[in-house]
Image (cartoon, rainbow, N blue to C red):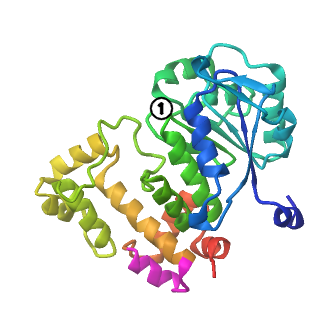
Amino acid sequence: MSKESSQARPHRVVALVDDNSNPFEVACATEVFGIHRPEVGGLLYDFRLCARRGRVPMRQGFFSMTDVADLAAVDTADTLIVPNRPDTGTPKPPDVLAAIARAHRRGARVIGLCSGAFTLAEAGVLAGRRATVHWMWAEEFRHRYPDVTVDEEVLYVDDGDILTSAGSAAALDLALHVVALDHGAEVAAAVARRLVFAAHRPGGQSQFIARPIPRDRGTALGSALEWAERHAAEPIGVRAIARHAGLSPATLHRRFRDELGCTPLAWLTGVRLRHARRLLETTTLPIERIARASGLGTTASLRSRLAAETGLTPTAYRRHFRRA
């Protein structure tokens, strides 16, 4: 897209809704990409819903969606979203698959939510790529599409121009990740706060979470997490968090695996990286000072972790997201 056209309109996100799509995933996309967001100054995207027909029955016939755009809207998308489909064994209409393949060929970012990954694979855009899908469909997916590297244990996979998420709530995790890529960590955090949704769940976090992580000050682990976030810039480690929670390091690891789906060190590193990204976005501090102030220690550490998360160097990230 040329500089002039990008200034003429915001980034356009189109959700391709098909028969029996899950309303939840469609609502997640609409909420994050389509709703006017006063907490960040208005609309972040130009959002459209489209379908093969003007009337689309939702899953189990709960209701029908009407008056959506036709498939021609796919050809205008900068980002194309393909939601969940429960009928994974039913071939998709050729015009739908052709529209997805065409969008990918011209450079649109393509997102598959939950079993929407089946539609992307059927369209041929996932061959040789990494993807995730809800764990219930992972075996079927792997059998039908052996040329796709599927990881059913993570919340979402960012493979550059193709992103996929696991089931239901992971659609929100991926949507917030996309907002952070496009608008920065501070904007994504503001949207997450408005949604009353955790902004800290990384894509590599496990799908298999027994219960939400306790953040209540009345719980030992919740108190320890709040303490660790306040002191993340200091040279604290897993043992310090365990000691503050009154747990052994082994028990702390087990609690994190059960309740957050990641290790304590991965969680702490994520906290530090988010802080570094916000400092890059909102201050003029030198890069080496931001590395120290965020707890990542060195410029090299900040550079490698930021590149793994965003594909950008600290200087490029600041240039892209710095706001007056």
Does 19 sit left or right of 204 as displayed? Answer: right
Where residue 217 sits in the image (x, y, percent)? 21, 59
Front-lying residue, 35 or 29 = 35
Q: Is residue 317 magenta?
A: no
Q: Quadrant of the N terminus?
A: bottom right
Residue 131 visible in the shown view? no
Q: Quadrant of residue 39?
A: bottom right
- Horizontal and vertical percent position of residue 89: 63, 13
SS assignment for the magenta stretch, majority:
helix
Q: Nearer the viewer, residue 126 or 8?
A: 8
Q: Would residue 292 be counted in the magenta stretch?
A: yes
Q: Residues within 10 Å of mark 1 (few under 14, many from 20)?
A: many
Residue that appears at 51% across and 63% down: 190
Rendered residue at 54%/79% (across/down): 282
Q: Secondary structure at mark 1?
A: loop
Disc 1 target residue: 152
Amino acid type at circle 1 is: Glu
Determine whether 216 is above or below 190 in the image. Answer: above
> Which residue occupies the extreme top position in the image?
90
| Magenta range | 282-294
- Please state the horizontal and vertical placement of residue 151, each as a whole percent of the image: 50, 34
- Apparent side of residue 176 relative to residue 57 in the rendered image (left or right): left
Residue in view at x 77 percent, y 46 percent: 108
Taking 118 as reference, is 75 left or right?
A: right
Which quarter of the rendering shows the C terminus? bottom right
Would you identify the image quadrant in which residue 289 lies?
A: bottom left
Q: Is residue 121 above or below residue 103?
A: above
